[in-house]
Amino acid sequence: MDLHPSNLGLEPLGAESSATQRAYQALRKLIVTGDIKPGAKLKIEGLRKRLQTGASPIREALSLLTSDNLVERMDQRGFRASPTSQQNFEEILMLRCELENIALRQSIANQTQEWEESVVLSHHRMVRSHSSGGEDFEDLHKAFHMALLLNCEGPVLLKFCSQLYDLNIRYRYLAGSAMNYKRRDVSSEHKNIMESAIAGDADAACEHLLDHYRKTGAFLVGVLDEAKLA
Amino acid sequence: MDLHPSNLGLEPLGAESSATQRAYQALRKLIVTGDIKPGAKLKIEGLRKRLQTGASPIREALSLLTSDNLVERMDQRGFRASPTSQQNFEEILMLRCELENIALRQSIANQTQEWEESVVLSHHRMVRSHSSGGEDFEDLHKAFHMALLLNCEGPVLLKFCSQLYDLNIRYRYLAGSAMNYKRRDVSSEHKNIMESAIAGDADAACEHLLDHYRKTGAFLVGVLDEAKLA
DNA sequence: ATCATCGAAAATGTCGATATTATTTTCCGA
DNA sequence: TCGGAAAATAATATCGACATTTTCGATGAT
């Protein structure tokens, strides 16, 4: 019964029905992963050839991405990928902490068996992909974090969280995607979050979650600083 | 130097440059004010005639509105105005309280002379329009509330607040726009917020602000309940 | 009489072309 | 030689037409 298509970016990416959806997903990925650099101009003609589709779907996809804060529209001068900055990163981090704190507490308050199981399952899949060096780790990582929140019964809140996740992960790709997770022991952090959440201890779960974000954040600021990004 | 066009919905609506912008603003207004009813199907052909423009601008405008949560896209079945519900209203109210609380505190923390003046000015304009029964009261009311937050130096946060404001005001129109403000003494609430903010008292300002929202919210839930909306 | 299936009508999504607008290059004058 | 205006170039924004999909209604069988 879910009529909302651009749901949370967690659909099976394989066979999208409309060309617009394909272009939307493809462009989103290109921008989030950094294949299209922050601030880069997005020329319709170039994208048309790159994605093998017409101009209309491209244009609609860009319009959708505009309101996701991944693309900016310059009134009669086309589109460009949203620029990055340390200020922007810190704002995203702050908003993520605030909103996910709310969402996670609600999720835990509404605790059900199905939700518990979905959290355990998504965690397991993420861990398995990580140890086997799976290519889909990033998707599963997002799936895990969203699974934690998904029980909160607030569609708008969830959408904000999903948007902010994508905005944030963009900075991780900028710093080199593999590196971060090898150098930090992030597994135990995930495990702590999951276990506290399942145990119904909202305070502990949120503390672990926000800690996780702030540590990742501090780490990233350091790396990005070296890379002279901002 | 502000390149972002769909800024916060506070631009002069008069002469938009592109047809897409015109359609976007027009459709937004039609939906927010309830001229287009919640859940109504948005047929391209109909809108094309109604707004005197081509199909492409309409489609792009609808795509933009989709990410603003004012329009929903059904994969191969066109668009429709987002439905309303009491749950949705309560979520919006909650998020507004959380986010504006953050934004207002930051605004006050960054207090400057220009900001103070813009708050006073926008308040005065709103009051004047109200007493003279001006047609633009709703726009000025939004301008006042946004002016309070505008100093917070967080573009994403501001955008969220602006979006939530529009989602919220939609419910007020649903209940009959004039009625609400006549029956409640909202003037003193506004005044309290403004004076506390200018005085630099963040705690008091936020308390007044959230109180203002919660009172309006409770009032609206009552009215909407009678109207058997949700 | 009810339900399923088929067909007609309408609406969506997509494409190619065109006019308008921005950008770059060139050329002329100071 | 440098600055600025004007033409040339490129890119965007918009339109109209077409193909595909959905929806609604009618027909016919059980």
Image: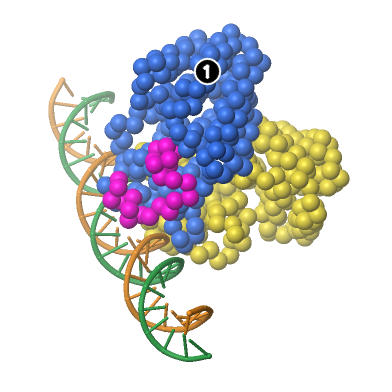
Chain colours: A blue, B yellow, C green, D orange
Query: What span is colored magenta in the figure?
Result: A28-51
Q: Residue A228: x, y in percent?
A: 54, 43
Q: In the image, is A83 to the left or to the right of B89?
A: left
**Can residue B170 be seen in this snapshot?**
no
Residue B108, above or below B53? above
Q: Where is residue B72 drawn, in percent x and y?
A: 46, 40
Q: Quadrant of the C terminus of chain B?
A: top right
Instruction: From the viewer's perspective, tell me whether residue A189 is left or right of residue C6.
Output: right
Vertical comparison of A92 with A154: above or below: below
Label 1 marks a residue whose chain is A
Q: Quadrant of residue A78?
A: bottom left
Q: Residue at x 53, y 14 (%)?
A: A188
Q: Residue at x 67, y 54 (%)?
A: B139
Count up the numbered dots: 1
List the residue tagged with mark 1: A185
User: Residue A29, can we see it?
Assistant: yes
Residue B26 x/y as whole percent? 52, 56
